[in-house]
Image (cartoon, rainbow, N blue to C red):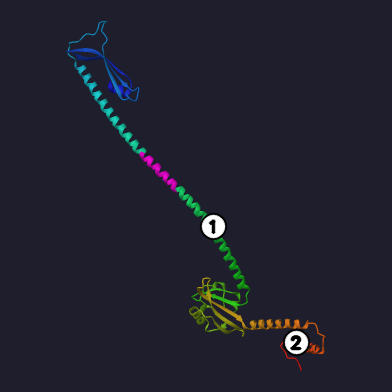
Amino acid sequence: MVHKAVTQGQAQVATDARVRSDGAWHRVRVTVEPLGTSAETEGLIMVSFADGEPENGFPARAVSAAPSEAEDSLVRQLEEQLRTSREELESTIGEVERSNEELRAANEEVMSVNEELQSTNEELETSKEELQSLNEELGTVNAQLQTKIDEVERASDDLSNLLTSTNIATVFLDPQLRIRRFTPAATRLFTLIPSDVGRPLADIAQKFADPKLLDDAQAVLQHLAPRQLEVQAEGGRRYFRQVLPYRTQDSRINGVVLTFSDVAADALYAARSELEGRSQVCRRFSTMPPMRSSRSTSRARCSRSTGAPSACLGTRPRR
């Protein structure tokens, strides 16, 4: 009965139970009812005993006969069920307590994980701010770098146009005397093609006689003193060859520079410049107004007018 009352949650009633009292057996009514109306009485069972109903209208009377084996078996069965229910109840209470302990431990772990997540979130926010600041700095550096790149590109374009437009043969060599760059005019003195960049100068054929070129280049790298020499190219054309150290902006030597100036072209340019200068002097003398103040001044004017053009042109006047 107790087991059924616990498992089914309903009151169980036995009307044919017998209880021994005062040396005799009496018929009683046994009621087993679970008490689950409140949290304080949850899990408790109320067992009540009441006098049995009278038989044939007469009150119950004591029975002096000894209990039968069925009654003893029923009592033992009830006791066994009660013990089993008590053990199950204790086991259930233990499991509930263990579950509560596990829930409390899990709750503590969840709270600890939540705190760790909050700390990690704060660290992520700090890292995000640092990344944003770093991104802004990188943007500024990128803009500065782009400005520098534009300046370098303009300088490279200016240098390329300068090397292309100049008529002076120029060859740039690195410290190992390998070709770094050359002007188009240098192809008149060396058999150079664009793919020769990076090749040693000793592997390039020359169109002029200069056996000391490589030695002078090595000497300039060691002593940093320029070397000059007049050389003759094919066809009899003469060039003024210079070997100069290649200096970087921080005054480091990073190779040598070979320049070849056309001697005839330089002499022609110098003569032309001198002739233009003398022509300007002659034009200034020819535009001066005559002076008529006296005979001496007229003579001076005549001598000046006759002698100035000769002086301008570099000739002597006839006497």
Query: What residue would you read off at disc 2?
Result: 308
Q: Nearer the viewer, residue 17 or 136?
A: 136
Instruction: For label 1, count other residues whose C-alpha is less than 10 Å away and answer few (under 14), some (14-19) or many (20+).
Output: few
Of the two numbered discs 2 and 1 in the rendering, the one whose residue sits closer to the viewer: 2
Q: Position of residue 36 (x, y in %)?
A: 33, 23
Instruction: Tell me: residue 166, above or below residue 22.
Output: below
Residue at 24% across, 25% down: 83
Res 317 → quadrant: bottom right
Judged from the image, the secondary structure of the residue bearing numbered disc 1 is helix
Q: Position of residue 19 (x, y in %)?
A: 21, 15
Tag shown at residue 140: 1
Q: In the drawing, does residue 36 fall left or right of residue 147? A: left
Q: What is the secondary structure assignment of the residue under circle 2?
A: helix
The reply to whether the C-beta atoms of the residues labelled 2 and 1 are less than 8 Å apart is no
CA gap between label 2 and label 1 equals 68 Å
**Is most of the magenta stretch helix, strand or loop?**
helix
From which residue to which does the magenta span run? Answer: 108-123
- The image shows residue 96 at horizontal and vertical percentages of 31, 31
